[in-house]
Every structure is written in structure tokens, then in C-alpha cells.
Image (spheres, rainbow, N blue to C red):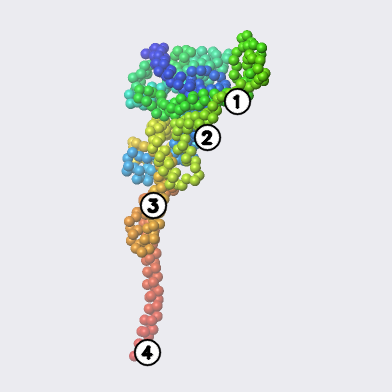
């Protein structure tokens, strides 16, 4: 298939996805204009331009920031080990060599996430802000040679997606602008001749490009139809209407997550969409309320005249002047126009609407965690409650962005040689990702504390009957307490090492016991020999 024909097929496919997204763009623009004051979809503003002209109340924006920060702490807290690795084969999870290798791999992966140069923490916050505000968000994980994984949150206005037959995202298209000199640097002058020509005269001239990543086995237009990596990658120049780069990925570098999704729809719906009507109402109420307060403080003036002035208009803005007919009475020639606005009703309506917006963003649960008076038990119960309420959302985010992101980082580090060689026993075995949320950590800590409390109570019983301790596997209890307290697995000796140490200790104790018995025997002998010798000598003298 000719490159031009393939390029035209891809552009046609892109136009279909763009048309399908047009209704969402209008919705997202309303959220941007009335709620968040960030991002543009149907309008074009220069960087730094004011975007909050329609926002009179910041309840949605503040709630969105609070929920995004809470998700960051709940799912990907950089100060904690927020995921763990285990084997699908349960027997391997009991093998000390295998589990230690897996623990080392996890630690190196976490170190890659935590590196400031990877930008994971800052970019992930942008993803959470988009998914809570607009319902959909995207992340790109690049594999930079010599460096490793680097994270970049992609603006929603650049992303166009399509699902496969299972409902998972199998196609991601990103339409973006790039300066001419950058295009030449990335693709080469031969691949982008128009950009190369512009780079010599006006290097900052921008061109439009399309990056498409899709599963290679999907029946899509413009296919390469050749064996290779599981994910196909194509770059296309809109200016030249031509494919300028072909390649692939071992994992999908684009992770796109949806807060929740209605059947038949591709893009997600989130708290920003749910709370938009209330936020628009709040803005309207505040706008009217502020205007009436201004008029109450600085009301329009009624000024008498001999007659109504030709072309005179009714102006009721603050400090306005309205010319009225002089009826010849005794009233003041200049007086205020009395305002009869019911200002006392606005605060109650505002409070009601604000509470509804905060409820849509689950602010009550999030703020409860910040109460310093809560006990550990209350924290655990509240964590369980929040987990139940948010479990569908958290589950979707784990499947659509966290799990692919962890797999991508694992693959990047493995191919770059930054992970230790795996033991032979785990060759071909599947690895499972487990997310260590605050709820899971709280439950493990609660279990560890329960074990300690039980032992303390049993110790008192053991004073009367020591055999009661036979009910407990103390080795397993110690390991459970260590796991509950988050002690790294490298600190805990393997079961084989413990058995070997105990054998050595038992042998040393046996040898020590034999020495003591030998010393006792020698001591007894040293006492008996003089006595026997004396008895033998005395007997001889008497004879």
C-alpha cells in the first residue's frame, strides 16, 4: 500500500474520531469556562490569557484540586510503596529467592517513579486534575535511552481515542503542534522537507502533526501488516499529508483513564461534569448578588428635571443617574433609587449549591481524614467507607492507567538492564501487580496490632499454664507483624536461613552441653582419685 494512500486512510480515520469527539469538546469548554478556569477546547487563547471571566465562585475549582490531591495520596503517594509485585503461582510466593528478587525489582521501579527527573509526581497530579474535572485524562511514558522512563501528562484537547471489542482503549491519536526546528531535530530534514525549509528562515513556525499508537492486531486502516512490536506507532505530518515515521512499542506508552463511563460512550464522565449545573447556577447567583450589593451600597440617583429628556434611558447600574419628571412637589431634587432586592436569600441558596458541588467531589470524606481528633480505629473505618464509595472509580483507574504504567516502567527498566537477572525458577512465570492503598496498609497494621494484643493477653495465661503457647506459630506471627508494619522483606531472614541458624545453634548448644558434662565428669574424677588413692594406702598400712 502506497504511503500516500495509507496516510489518507489514517487522516480519514482521525477525522471520524474528531467528529465523534465534537460534542464532548463543547461540554469540556463549559467546564473550563465556568468551573476550573483551565484548558481550552473550542476556543484558542494565547498562553497566559485570562480564563476566569465567567467564574464568580471557586467551589468547583477548590473541590477539584482537593480531590485530585487526595487521589494522588490514596493511589500513588510518592512517600510510600504504593504497589507491590507477587507471582501468579502461589508456590513461588513462598520461595525466598524469588520473593527477594521481586522485592528488589519493586524497589528499583519505585526509585524510577520517585526520581525528580522523571517528573512522575508533578505530571501525575495533572492527570488526576483532568480526570476529576473533565472525566478523562492521559499520560505518556517515554523510554529515553540512558535515562529510563519519563512521564508527561498529555492535554485532553490533544487526545483522540477509540476502543476495541472488549471496551479497552486500543487506539490513541495525539494531534499536536511542533516548531519547525524541533520537527527537524526529531524526524530529520528528509522526512519533513517543509519544516526543514521553514527552520532555516523562521525556525519557530509551527506545523501540525499526528501521532497514532494502536494495537498491531486490530483491523484498522493504514496497517503495516508486518510482524513486530505489539503496538504500532506512526507519525504523520498534516502539512505534507504524509507518514514521516514508523515504529512500535513493546507496551502502550499512552495511558488514558476515565472516571466513569456510560454504555455506548468512549470518553468519561466525572465530578466536573456532574457538578456543572450547580456551578453555573452559583456563578449566576453570585453575579446577581454582587450587582445588587453594589447598587445597595452605591445606588442609582433620581434627578428631577422639567421634563423627561429626549432619548433618556433607564440606567440602574451603581452610581447611574436617571432623569425623571419634576412634578412640582416638595421632594428632594436629587435622591437615591431604593433597591428592594432580597439579599438575605442569596447566602442560603449559595450554601446549598456549594454543598451539592462538594458532595459531587466527595469532599466530606476527604476532609474527614484531616481531623486530628480521629483515632486509628476511626481512620480505618473511614478508609474502608471511602474505599467502598470510590471502589468503582479506583478499580477503573487501576486497570486503565496504573497497571499499564507499572508494566511500562517494568519493561523499560528490564530492557535497559537496570533490573537484576531473574532466578531460573521464575522463567516464564507471570507477575501480578497489587496496589497497596492506605486501606490495605491500615488493615495490615490492624492485623499486626491484633496479633501483638493477643500475645500479651496469652502471656498472662502462660504464667499459669505455659502449654497455652503451643497454639501459636510464633515464626509466622513474627512475619505477619513485620509485614503489617511495612518492614522490607530484605531485613527478614528466609525460612531456610532461620532453619540453618537454628541447626547451628542447636549443634553449638549440644557441644556446649557435652563440654559441661565432660567437665563435670572430670571434676568428679579429680575428687575421687585422691580419695581412692588414700583409701588404698591406708588399707596397705594396716596389713
Element at badge 2? helix
Disc nearer the start of the sequence (4/1): 1
> Residue at horizontal 43%, vertical 18%?
22
Element at badge 3? helix
> Residue at horizontal 50%, vertical 21%?
40
Q: How many marks?
A: 4
**Residue in the foreground of this view, choosing between 143 and 345:** 345
CA separation, marks 1 and 2? Answer: 54 Å
> Residue at horizontal 40%, vertical 35%?
390
Kindly identify which numbered label has been placed on residue 451: 3
**Residue projecting furthest to the bottom:** 542
Q: Which residue is mark 1?
A: 296
Q: Residues within 10 Å of mark 4 (few under 14, many from 20)?
A: few
**Residue 492, horizontal then vertical, whole percent:** 42, 49
Disc nearer the start of the sequence (3/2): 2
Q: Is residue 513 above or below residue 68?
A: below
Amino acid at each position: 500500500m502506497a504511503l500516500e494512500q495509507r496516510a489518507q486512510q489514517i487522516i480519514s480515520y482521525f477525522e471520524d474520531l474528531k467528529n465523534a469527539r465534537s460534542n464532548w469538546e463543547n461540554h469540556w469548554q463549559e467546564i473550563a469556562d465556568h468551573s476550573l478556569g483551565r484548558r481550552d477546547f473550542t476556543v484558542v487563547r494565547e498562553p497566559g490569557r485570562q480564563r476566569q471571566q465567567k467564574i464568580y465562585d471557586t467551589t468547583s475549582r477548590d473541590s477539584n484540586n482537593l480531590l485530585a490531591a487526595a487521589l494522588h495520596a490514596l493511589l500513588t503517594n510518592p512517600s510510600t510503596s504504593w504497589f507491590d509485585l507477587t507471582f501468579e503461582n502461589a508456590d513461588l510466593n513462598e520461595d525466598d529467592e524469588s520473593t527477594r528478587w521481586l522485592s528488589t525489582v519493586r524497589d528499583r521501579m519505585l526509585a524510577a517513579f520517585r526520581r525528580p527527573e522523571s517528573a512522575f509526581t508533578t505530571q501525575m497530579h495533572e492527570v488526576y486534575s483532568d480526570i476529576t474535572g473533565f472525566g478523562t485524562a492521559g499520560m505518556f511514558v517515554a523510554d529515553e535511552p540512558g535515562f529510563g522512563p519519563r512521564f508527561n501528562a498529555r492535554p485532553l484537547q490533544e487526545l483522540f481515542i477509540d476502543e476495541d471489542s472488549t471496551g479497552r482503549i486500543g487506539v490513541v491519536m495525539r494531534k499536536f503542534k511542533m516548531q519547525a526546528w524541533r520537527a527537524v531535530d526529531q524526524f530529520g530534514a528528509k522526512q519533513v522537507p517543509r519544516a526543514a525549509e521553514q527552520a532555516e528562515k523562521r525556525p519557530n513556525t509551527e506545523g501540525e502533526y499526528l501521532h497514532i499508537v494502536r494495537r498491531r492486531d486490530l483491523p484498522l486502516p493504514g496497517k503495516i501488516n508486518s510482524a513486530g512490536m505489539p503496538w504500532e506507532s506512526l507519525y504523520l505530518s498534516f502539512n505534507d499529508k504524509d507518514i514521516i515515521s514508523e515504529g512500535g512499542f513493546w507496551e502502550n506508552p499512552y495511558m488514558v483513564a476515565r472516571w466513569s463511563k456510560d454504555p455506548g460512550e468512549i470518553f468519561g464522565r466525572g465530578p466536573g461534569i456532574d457538578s456543572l449545573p450547580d456551578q453555573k447556577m452559583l456563578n449566576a447567583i453570585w453575579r446577581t448578588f454582587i450587582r445588587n450589593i453594589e447598587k445597595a451600597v452605591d445606588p442609582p440617583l433620581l434627578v428631577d428635571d422639567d421634563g423627561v429628556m429626549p432619548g433618556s434611558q433607564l440606567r440602574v447600574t451603581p452610581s447611574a443617574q436617571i432623569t425623571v419628571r419634576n412634578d412640582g412637589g416638595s421632594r428632594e431634587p436629587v435622591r437615591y433609587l431604593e433597591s428592594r432586592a432580597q439579599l438575605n436569600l442569596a447566602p442560603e441558596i449559595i450554601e446549598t449549591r456549594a454543598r451539592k458541588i462538594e458532595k459531587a467531589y466527595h469532599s466530606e470524606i476527604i476532609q474527614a481524614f484531616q481531623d486530628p481528633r480521629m483515632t486509628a480505629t476511626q481512620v480505618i473505618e473511614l478508609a474502608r467507607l471511602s474505599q467502598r464509595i470510590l471502589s468503582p472509580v479506583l478499580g477503573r483507574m487501576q486497570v486503565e492507567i496504573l497497571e499499564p504504567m507499572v508494566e511500562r516502567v517494568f519493561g523499560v527498566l528490564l530492557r535497559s538492564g537496570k533490573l537484576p537477572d531473574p532466578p531460573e525458577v521464575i522463567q516464564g512465570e507471570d507477575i501480578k501487580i497489587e496496589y497497596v492503598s492506605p486501606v490495605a496498609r491500615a488493615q495490615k497494621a490492624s492485623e499486626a496490632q491484633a496479633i501483638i494484643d493477643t500475645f500479651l493477653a496469652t502471656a498472662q495465661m502462660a504464667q499459669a499454664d505455659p502449654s497455652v503457647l503451643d497454639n501459636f506459630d510464633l515464626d509466622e506471627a513474627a512475619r505477619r507483624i513485620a509485614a503489617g508494619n511495612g518492614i522490607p522483606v530484605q531485613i527478614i531472614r528466609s525460612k531456610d536461613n532461620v532453619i540453618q541458624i537454628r541447626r547451628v545453634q542447636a549443634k553449638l548448644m549440644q557441644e556446649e552441653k557435652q563440654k559441661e558434662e565432660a567437665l563435670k565428669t572430670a571434676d568428679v574424677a579429680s575428687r575421687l582419685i585422691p580419695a581412692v588413692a588414700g583409701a588404698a594406702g591406708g588399707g596397705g598400712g594396716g596389713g
